[in-house]
Amino acid sequence: MKIDRRSFLSLGLGVAAGSVLSPLPWKLTDDLSIWTQTWPWTPVPKDGAVHYVHSVSTLCSGGCGIQVRKVDDRAIKIEGMEGYPGSDGKACNQCLAGIQKLYGPDHIQTPLKRVGNRGEGRFAPISWDEAMSMVAEQLKKLRTEGKSQTLGCVVEREYGTIPQLFKRFAKVYGSPNFMTMPSYLDGYEQIFKIMQGEEAIPGFDLENADYILSFGSGLVEGWGSAPRMFQANSLWKEKGVPVVQFEPRLSNTAAKATQWVPINPGAEAILALGLAHVIIKENLFHYDFVNRYSARFEAWEDGQGTEQKGFKDRVLDRYDPRYVSRVTGVPSSQIEKIAREFAKAESPIALCGRGAGHTPGAIFEFHAVHALNGLVGNINRKGGVWALPKPDYIAWPEPALDEVAKKGGDTPRVDGAGTETYPAASSLTHRLPAMINDAEESPIQVLLVHGANPCYCLPDTETVRAAFEKIPCIVSFASHMDETALMADLILPDHGHLEKYQDVPAPEGLSVPVIGLARPVVAPLYDTRHVGDTVIQLAKAMGGGMADSFPWKNYEECLRKTLGQHWKTMEEKGWFSPDFSGPDWNEAFETPTRNFVFIPERYGKDTEEAGVSPIEVEGDPITFPMVMIPFDHVRIAAGPVGNAPFVMKTIEDTLLRDKDIFVQVHPKTAGKAGLEEGVLAVLSTPKGSAKVRVHVYDGIQPGLVAVPRGLGRGSGDEFMADKGVNVNRLIGPVEDPVSGLNAAWGIRANLTIA
Amino acid sequence: MKKAADHTKPKRYGMVIDLDKCTGCGACMVACFAENNIPFKKDESEKLLSITWMRVYKLSNKKKYPDTDICYLPRPCMHCEGHEGHSPCVSVCPATVTDYSTETGIVSQIYTRCFGCRYCMAACPYHARYFNWWDPVWPKGMEKMLSPDVSVRMRGVVEKCSFCYHRYQRAKDKAYVEGRTDVEEEEYQTACTQACPARAITFGDLNNPKHKVYELKQDPHAFRLLERLGTNPKVYYVSSREWVRKSGDNYLKHEEPGHIATKH
Amino acid sequence: MDSALIPKGVQRCSLGKFTLLIAVVGAVLLWGVYAMLLCWIKGLNQTNMNDYYGFALWIWADLAVIALGGGAFFTGFLKYIVGKDELKNIINYAVLIGFICYSSALLILAIDIGQPLRGWFIFWHANVHSMLTEVAFCLSCYFAVLTIEYIPLILENRQLNKVPFFHHLAHNMHGIMAVFAATGAFLSFFHQGSLGGVSGVLFGRPFGYREGVFVWPWTFFLFTWSAAAYGPSFTLMCTKILEKASGKQLVKDNVVDLLAKISGWMILTYIIAKIADTLYWALVTAPARGHTLMDFYSNNPVYGIWILVLEIVLGGIIPAIILVVPGTRRNGYLRMTAIILGVIGVSVNRWVMVLQVMAVPVMPFDFWAMYYPSWQEVATTILPVAYGIILIALSYRYLPIFPQEPELNPVD
Amino acid sequence: MFPGFFEWIWDGGHMLFMGGLWYALGIIGLGLTYCIFKAAIETAQGDGEGHGHGDEHH
């Protein structure tokens, strides 16, 4: 056939018509659409058998009781565990998103040895045997050199078998330097010691309280156990319990409160004493408690036989509402009104610990606030503040100490806690960096860090880093990469929080003691080792008396034996609550006079002379005309562990946008500095400066710059790392001269357009 | 509109959210993300590109210091009933992807049918609908956390809150096995309701006098968002604060909330 | 070289010059194609659209080109149904422009949807209550009609017409073109209207929402009307551009005048209806939902009341008056000004009905959402323009588009 | 789109919409078929040159 143009065209048309009429194009179209519905790069979750595992999450300080939904061997979702004390079926954001920490990319997978410079983040995997012998060798060497006291341990909290294993390790090794991270609980601990003569932890019967005075505590922003506090808050709403929030900034807690009372920052103690003034003056205090169970309310004789003014007269002399109003900025009419309402309530309770309580604050504040509770007699009573005994279920036999241990153990602590200067303190870890930096040779030669993240959480992180640079050997037991692990020489990774057994004395602030049991939800994913096992094995490797002090085969045996008869209950229920009935007032206090002491021994004179004035913050007002205050936000974890991706996703765009943190300033403050919403600015403090964005917020006192805590993580997964600024980098500690605690509530600052 | 199944009474699942209790903690969002396989990107701070079936808005009374006040408002899909099931989004979807069930009152979404025209997003005044601008990606290993109950959405489709419909199915299956025709109130609760630590969210059948929501929605302080548009949403809010109630809808200067006749 | 393909009796520029033009425009086209491929392969994250701005530049471009392409159906309607025979001298060009506009609209839609490979679900799982379904059906059908109207033109190319089958086919198609044109007008009426309905039915968006009759909001009718009114203006504008580019008069003045007059009267009646609609909306519809007119035009960096003035006064009243009054209409400059203002006016209307609808906050605690397109969106929106220029250039060069051209420009 | 398909409903809206649609499609289809067939027949009959150059059709 001759192919001319005509037949070619016809052929083309024929082919076109033919293929349209054939099923081929339709079939292809259909196949393509099916392909788009099953793209191979869009994961299809595998189905399987569903079951639940109960556990306790250790990601937050509150210790949320959780149940984990599993499909076959995969953990799918975390929910709250019904009936768990405090959290009762609920959990905080961090714990709810905990599975992302389990499967997330920053889970450390194997022991690591530093190969780059300190903090550079270059590590090489090594075997467990190698890692363990390296640590053991270091420790042996130090001990033979007679420098056992230069071993330091930093953990987040003191209680539970794991911190106690570290404490015991340090003790038998011969070092007093077992340290915990600062928190408002340190303030309460000291207050119980000096006002009630007790070694105790605070419990707050908030569910039964009927009037809440909060001196800047972020009641719904991470103070105590978050889910418990949310539920308490809802209960208050249902019962119409008044909540008064004193705070310079309209926080979420202030917004939820019945009444937000803006106050000059740092003046909380004065305000508390002003309230006390009204209560005393108008005879509204609890007569029975004050007259029969307290001391030094009235004038008293000191050891030298000199008469000292009592609490009553001191308060009446100095803190009349007009003066207090001037210092705090709270109108005196309001002070009077609140004081009356507070005193007339059945079970009023006053609380302190700023924000989520990451910084203790001045002991005066704790004293003034606790004195208010004393005035209304709401101590160890329904709806009041309880002094709970420290967890005592860990009853290991006293270890036998050899000469080195005794000698080393008797040396004064590096952080100064428990020394003559700060007798009531048990840990002052924020003082450690300065001590190291000021010394020629670091007083800490080997530092073991578990569960804590001092390089992120301690104030003035630059100084902390400098101090850590000076420590010859840092061993981290982190399960996830954090700022401190980055500074370590060796990382002996612990199992993740869903991969191990652990006792969790929890939840914080609950008025009954509870011990929860965290248990493995999934088998460990990587070549990690339970930190308890690591410590026990290290002790065994040290040999001699040290090995004998750790008689357990492994951690699980240690835990089972420690919990003894309770183990079964805990396995079944997930927790157990030791019997506790608070003693009556006549037996409750263990001060020398067996009374609640309004003016503690050591503090009497100091207060008398100096009075209580707001804690001054660092920096000169001319270079730094504003004042920076950190604040806690409930969607940002400010503790050792940062936000999981899901929680990052909940952060508002007025706190973080892309990599920029927002600081909050009042429109007037912004106007004065020529700043507008969203502009880039430089926030500088005596400790450093940072690039920030401005959020103009009506709910903040003019002159302040509020910075959210918990951002600016220098490590971790891509979802949280390098976003925003770590406020701890911009603020330094201010030492409370009496307690040694960090009393800083802010720092002077300046905010200028970038 | 699907007709109600024969043997059970038609339900209208809905929520009552107590804004006095809500603390804005965001646990509802986190629980929702985990329950529904919501993807997450490196940067989620651009909220207009961030998939949050449940989103907690922050409201302000816009007053000056110290009279400033704020309130949080969790916003799931409102599962609007509109007029006889004509919710704003259902009637506009060209491919019958989204539907109002007269059996449950739930507005469904068939991801594999959606071709991503986003008309429904334009129709929804609550911004409850989200588009998958990117392929969902889980870092290596993290796909282990995906729930088999909810399919993962592919790039290019719209998604939204389903009132955890898979939980309803699960509850119904259970009821069926146990020889019951109906699902009990506590058997079917959404993930956000379950997670809300303030117990601010109550979920149930608005038609059923035995369910808590039935009573709660009649609170004199109850309101719904943008009622005046006639969307007829099934999520109620309760607030004791007047300015919050007023923030729930648009009012002319002389108008007062509660005195406006609304459609439906 | 290609003289055998060029229609008899007309003069065309050299092939080299022509190729250069095609190459330059082709480069722009390729840029657009590259952006289009990016959107298809990487997804719509290439755009600056977001969850508040699900409809943006593309949907505006879609609505605008369809409104402007309305010249095809309305001129067809006037010629074949009303019987304005003079319009045969411009109908081919109107059809060509319509074809370009509609094919562009379909292409843009194919880029705009998140799952183009299953875009046909709109037909398969059609929800007849959706305005978009109506749009899709009528748009595709009317595109088929436009193709049918365009095919005989192609077949009239000197070489193709030598094929007897093509010759007969073209002849027969011309023979029953009135039927096609009538169908096209019917389809156009609906899809132009449905496009108006797209925002008009959004009762969740008080800025776009309008009341109406039965299932159709007022915008349904306003859109059809405005397309019929402004479409011919756009045809005239394109004619003018081509005349400028070719340096020849292609259509006689009386034809232009007639179409301009019709367009003018249509704009006038439309703008009266539009003003009535705006008043009713501002005074009744919006206040019933708690909004005042100024809520929609304040507290944001872009949308002020100026846009309403631009649309209605500058883009409506003024061109209507100029085109209706014979004296001003016959003034070439004024006529052109009116036409351009009209084209701007209708484009602004479509912009407002898409982008401002998205921008206005509805929840009282929400905010004005602002948006600017990404380069990929701009490139894919320019793509149809480049494609249109190329198709017009090719058609003009090789097809007898303008019957009056040989007469107006006799070749020596 | 076609009766009998998944989710097909016979209601007023459908009848109106689909009625209009198929009516339009029918006209277009029939018109096209008519033109093509007629052209094919005319081509076969060879009276291709019959109606000149059809300028009147423009």
Image: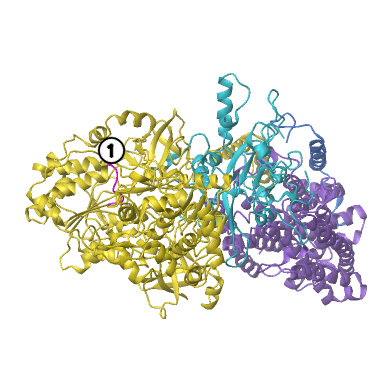
In the picture as drawn, the residue positioned furthest to the bottom comes out as: A622
Find residue A647 and report its horizontal and vertical position in percent: 46, 50
For badge 1, the amino acid type reads: Tyr
Q: Tell me, yes or no, whether the highlighted magenta stretch contains residue A157.
A: yes
The residue tagged 1 is A393
Q: Colour of chain B?
A: cyan
Residue C190 falls left or right of residue A267: right
Magenta-drawn stretch, dominant element (helix, strand or loop): loop
Q: Which is nearer the eye, A193 or C407?
A: A193
Q: Tell me, yes or no, whether the highlighted magenta stretch contains residue A23.
A: no
Image quarter (top left, top right, bottom left or bottom right) of the N terminus of chain A:
top right
Residue lying at 28% horizontally and 34% vertically, measured from the top left: A563
SS at mark 1 in the image: loop
Q: Chain C is drawn in which colour?
A: purple
Can residue C59 be seen here?
yes
Find residue C378 and report its horizontal and vertical position in percent: 61, 63
Q: Which is nearer the eye, C196 or A241?
A: A241
Q: Colour of chain D?
A: blue
Q: Colour of chain A?
A: yellow
Where A646 sits versus A301, above or below? above
Where D57 sits versus D39, above or below? below
Find residue C164 and report its horizontal and vertical position in percent: 77, 47
Which chain hosts label 1?
A
Find residue C216 and report its horizontal and vertical position in percent: 82, 48
Where C12 sits versus A285, above or below? below
Residue lying at 42% horizontally and 81% vertically, measured from the top left: A622
What is the span of residues highlighted in magenta in the rendered image?
A155-160
